[in-house]
Amino acid sequence: MGGISYLVDVGLSNLLVYGLFGFPAVLHDSPLKAKIISTIASIIVAWLGNKFLTYKDRSSGSNVRGFVMFVVVNLIGMLVVLAPLGVTWYLLGLHDRLSYNLSTNVIGIALGMVFRFYAYRTWVFRDAPQKEVVVTDVADDLAGRG
């Protein structure tokens, strides 16, 4: 599911910052805003895919609790992704497509992916608790000692 979310994030952020096939670059001077918008879109895609496909056998508690945890983890992950972009765009002054994509869609997303993977498994989609099976000795049960 991560691959589809990644494509949504990268495609939409590039579309907003640089435009494509006649579609204007509506956020050319605001790459952080573009990345925030594309990240929110990818969060929605990722939630649906993780909830119903990738982690369908794990518990996230109630749907509301699971979604809130998922959003919180992804908002923190978004800050991780935005940091390299902010450094590249604003501190280093590199505004070309290659620098933009390397900083945000390679370095930033790789760092965010590591954080999200850990957080999903630890906090959002935890292992469902195993039911304890009690085994008694049949002889004890028959003798009334069980």
Image (cartoon, rainbow, N blue to C red):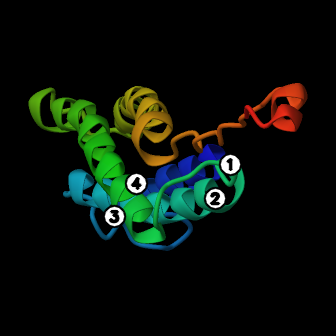
Label 3 environment density (alpha carbons within 10 Å; few <14, some 14–19, many ≥20): some
Task: Kindly identify which numbered label has been placed on residue 19.
Answer: none
**In the image: residue 120, left or right of residue 137:** left
- Percent from the top left, x then y, of residue 135? 77, 31
Question: Does the residue at mark 2 contact the one at mark 1 (Cβ under 8 Å)?
Answer: yes
**In the image: residue 68, left or right of residue 110:** left
Question: Does the residue at mark 3 contact the one at mark 2 (Cβ under 8 Å)?
Answer: no
Q: Which residue is mark 1?
A: 54
Distance from the alpha carbon under mark 2 to that under mark 1 = 6 Å
SS assignment at label 1: helix
Q: Nearer the viewer, mark 3 or mark 2?
A: 2
For marks 2 and 4, the one nearer the N-term is 2
Specify the amino acid type for callout 2: Gly
- Percent from the top left, x then y, of residue 140? 81, 28
* Residue that lies at the very extreme toward the front in this rendered image: 143
Distance from the alpha carbon under mark 2 to that under mark 4 = 12 Å
Specify the amino acid type for callout 3: Ile
For marks 4 and 3, the one nearer the N-term is 3
Q: Nearer the viewer, mark 4 or mark 3?
A: 4
Residue 85, by quadrant, is: top left
For marks 3 and 1, the one nearer the N-term is 3
For marks 4 and 1, the one nearer the N-term is 1
Q: Which residue is mark 2?
A: 49
Task: Kindly identify which numbered label has been placed on residue 70.
Answer: 4
Tell me the residue at 44%/27% (across/down): 114
Tell me the residue at 32%/53% (across/down): 35
- Percent from the top left, x then y, of residue 29? 19, 57
Distance from the alpha carbon under mark 3 to that under mark 1 = 24 Å
Distance from the alpha carbon under mark 4 to that under mark 3 = 17 Å
Whether residue 22 can be seen here = yes
Specify the amino acid type for callout 4: Phe
Residue toward you, 130 or 115: 130
